[in-house]
Amino acid sequence: MRPLTAGEVKQIGGRAGRFGIYNEGYVCAEGDNDFIANRIYADTPEIEYATIQFPETIIDIDAPMLDILLRWKDITVNAGYRKADIEREIKLCKMLEPVVPNKMFIYTAITTPFDEKEKTLLDLWFDMVVAEYRNESLLEEVFEIYSEKFSKKLDKLELTYHIFDLLYNFSIKFNHPDLSEPILRKKTQLSDEIIYRMSLFEKNKKHSSSTR
């Protein structure tokens, strides 16, 4: 967690207000409005470099996927540029390459968005990828398991939300359009449930403070 930069606040406000289409726009925020206002009117530093993403075209090089990633990591770029960090992709590739030899399949898997630092998500991702490679997709089964009655505990709800986020991204990456929409609906339900639980928590906190 960190405060948004001036550039990030302007980007969010600009997207919401469609700057350039309307002559006047308004930005509102819940919480510290002074912070938002200061960031909106603050000077934005000039861009010092451009970030280069890993180029998919080099996957065709005759070498294992891990070797390709490591070679790319070691390449020096010209001033004014920097390469995107691929430590995450290297870590995931090391897990997959011993059991999944297809380089494009590995690349699709390691670029699926999810929080690999959360062990539950990492284990689930690995099992689903290996099953997918063997044409034994686990996506529908996992979806049904986690679609059962949700926990009332906020931390478990949040983890379940992240699981559905992984399932949704997985369904897009590995072309399961029949499941994408149901997963998205469940994500929305979970989001509503989390907001509801948080509102109850805030009400209880205010009530306990007022009765002291």
Image (spheres, helix red, strand yellow):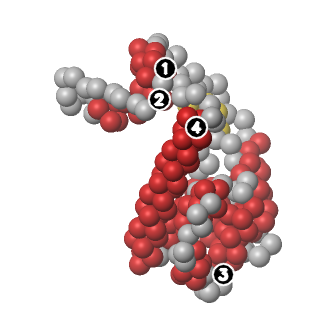
**In front of the other: 102 or 26:** 26
SS assignment at label 2:
loop
State which quarter of the image contains the N terminus.
Answer: top right
Residue drawn at (66%, 68%), measured in percent from left and top? 125
Q: Residues within 10 Å of mark 1 (few under 14, many from 20)?
A: some
State which quarter of the image contains the C terminus.
Answer: top right
Determine which of the numbered discs, if any, sits on residue 211 in the image.
4
Determine which of the numbered discs, if any, sits on residue 31 in the image.
2
**In front of the other: 11 or 40:** 40
Spatial CA distance of label 4 from label 3 is 55 Å
Residue 112 drawn above or below residue 55: below
Residue 141 drawn above or below residue 37: below
Residue drawn at (73%, 68%), measured in percent from left and top? 123
Spatial CA distance of label 1 from label 3 is 48 Å
Q: Amino acid at mark 4?
A: Thr
Spatial CA distance of label 3 from label 2 is 45 Å
Q: Amino acid at mark 2?
A: Gly
State yes or no: discs 2 and 4 in contact (Cβ < 8 Å). Answer: no
Which label lies toward us, 1 or 2? 2
Which label lies toward us, 1 or 3? 1
Tell me which label, 3 or 2, sits earlier in the chain.
Answer: 2
Q: Is residue 146 left or right of residue 199?
A: right
Q: Amino acid at mark 3?
A: Ala
Kindly indicate the quadrant of the structure image that contains residue 79: top right
Q: Residue 146, percent across and down? A: 58, 74
Q: Which residue is mark 1?
A: 35
Q: Residues within 10 Å of mark 4 (few under 14, many from 20)?
A: few
